[in-house]
């Protein structure tokens, strides 16, 4: 098993009286960790992209220690891990749009095969986004050159249906909100479903820029970040939006910490973390992730809970796992 090097990063989080320091675990040296999901009760699963693709690591202690449990998708790479209920979860690969399934909280995985024929016609991944809805439906967003589509399964991945394009350009990340599901994309538009992904409605174009980061904060609030570094807020589950202005460089990820607290990460030019305590209306720049690797950034981040404690766990572009415990 890969030796884990645990040390404290230089970045200190300033959240009122609580100032924890990031713990850094070098899990895939020089690699990329861009997919991570919370399976509950301390179990977290992550997957890797190139240059060390398709490795699956699992933690049973809220990200303190990790064990490699699988290698999936030969000559492919992992773009998303999504958790459902009862130990069920799925892995999505970006080049061949294969889906893998677990029924034991990520200990073992089986290949469900290629679920569609997506071809972006570019060097981008063919699929980035996947979500398991509250009733167990699995939805996958793709970047097909003919327009972004939704591939949907209601039987645990045994069979799949591919929609007609819902956008003229690629669609990116799926996000459950208070009254349905939204997906963003490269046309700058938001699309929404209130019938478990059967039909989709174009809510409208938010900005002439790719839409990337997205998260639901609760209380009907949704944040979206753009390639141009703007942050947009909806207070009605994605129906209407306000441009909160330019926050940083290209958006990569949001993670909601609860009660309006949010971390926002960027991945081009200045690769910084930003923090908001008011649902994105104002921001503090926390600077680099602090792993000591030039140009490293948070690729995907989640927040989980151990009792009343909020635990932030994320993977970086250079193969580190960073975690912090917040009161």
Image (tube, rainbow, N blue to C red):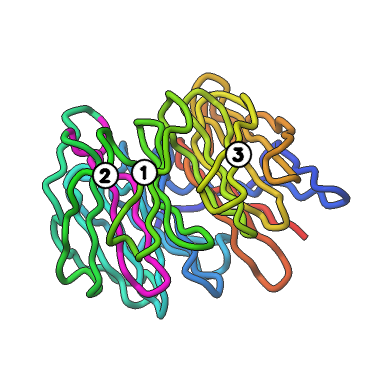
Q: In the rendered view, would you say 202 is above or below 304?
A: above
**Which quadrant would the N terminus be assigned to in this image?**
bottom left
Tag 3 secondary structure: strand
Picture coordinates of residue 3, whole percent (x, y): 47, 53
Q: Nearer the viewer, mark 1 or mark 3?
A: 1
Q: Which residue is mark 1?
A: 202
Measured Cα–Cα span from mark 3 to mark 2: 27 Å
Earlier along the polypeptide chain: callout 1 or callout 3? 1
Measured Cα–Cα span from mark 2 to mark 1: 8 Å
Does 126 lie within the magenta span? yes
Tag 1 secondary structure: strand
Mark 3 Cα-neighbour bin, 10 Å: few <14, some 14–19, many ≥20 = many
Q: Nearer the viewer, residue 162 or 14?
A: 162
Decide if residue 298 is on the left or right side of residue 309.
Answer: left
Q: In the rendered view, would you say 304 is above or below 278?
A: below
Q: Tell me what residue is drawn at x 37 percent, y 37 percent.
A: 185
Q: Nearer the viewer, mark 3 or mark 2?
A: 2
Residue 148 visible? The answer is: yes
Dots 2, 1 in contact, CB < 8 A: yes
Q: Which residue is mark 2?
A: 166
Tag 2 secondary structure: loop
Earlier along the polypeptide chain: callout 2 or callout 1? 2
Picture coordinates of residue 256, whole percent (x, y): 62, 52
Hey, which quadrant is residue 77 in on the image? top left
**Over which residues does the magenta segment extend?**
124-145
Q: Which residue is mark 3?
A: 264
Picture coordinates of residue 97, whole percent (x, y): 20, 50
Decide if residue 94 is on the left or right side of residue 230.
Answer: left
Does 143 lie within the magenta span? yes
Picture coordinates of residue 16, whole percent (x, y): 85, 48
């Amino acid at each position: 098993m890969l030796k884990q090097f645990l040390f404290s990063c230089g970045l200190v989080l300033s959240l009122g009286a609580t100032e924890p320091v990031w713990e850094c675990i070098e899990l895939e040296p020089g690699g990329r960790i861009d997919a991570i999901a919370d399976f509950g009760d301390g179990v977290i699963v992550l997957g890797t992209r190139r240059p060390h693709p398709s490795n699956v690591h699992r933690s049973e202690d809220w990200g303190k220690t990790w064990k490699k449990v699988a290698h999936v998708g030969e000559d492919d790479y992992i773009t998303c891990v999504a958790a459902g209920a009862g130990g069920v979860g799925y892995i999505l690969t970006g080049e061949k749009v294969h889906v893998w399934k677990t029924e034991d909280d990520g200990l073992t995985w089986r290949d469900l095969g290629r679920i569609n024929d997506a071809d972006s016609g570019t060097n981008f991944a063919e699929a980035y986004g996947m979500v398991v809805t509250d009733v167990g439906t699995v939805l996958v967003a793709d970047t097909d050159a003919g327009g972004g589509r939704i591939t949907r399964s209601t039987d645990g991945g045994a069979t799949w249906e591919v929609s007609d394009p819902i956008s003229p350009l690629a669609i990116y990340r799926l996000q459950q909100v208070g009254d349905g599901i939204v997906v963003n994309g490269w046309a700058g538009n938001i699309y929404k479903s209130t019938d478990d992904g059967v039909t989709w409605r174009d809510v409208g174009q938010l900005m002439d820029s790719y839409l990337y980061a997205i998260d639901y904060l609760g209380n009907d609030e949704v944040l979206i970040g753009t390639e141009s570094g703007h942050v947009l807020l909806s207070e009605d589950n994605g129906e209407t939006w306000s441009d909160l202005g330019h926050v940083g460089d290209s958006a990569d990820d949001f993670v909601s910490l609860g009660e309006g607290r949010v971390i926002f990460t960027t991945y081009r030019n200045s690769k910084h973390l930003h923090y908001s305590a008011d649902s994105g209306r104002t921001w503090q720049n926390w600077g680099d992730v602090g792993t000591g690797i030039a140009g490293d950034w948070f690729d995907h981040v989640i927040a989980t809970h151990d009792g009343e404690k909020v635990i932030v766990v994320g993977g970086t572009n250079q193969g580190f796992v960073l975690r912090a415990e917040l009161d």
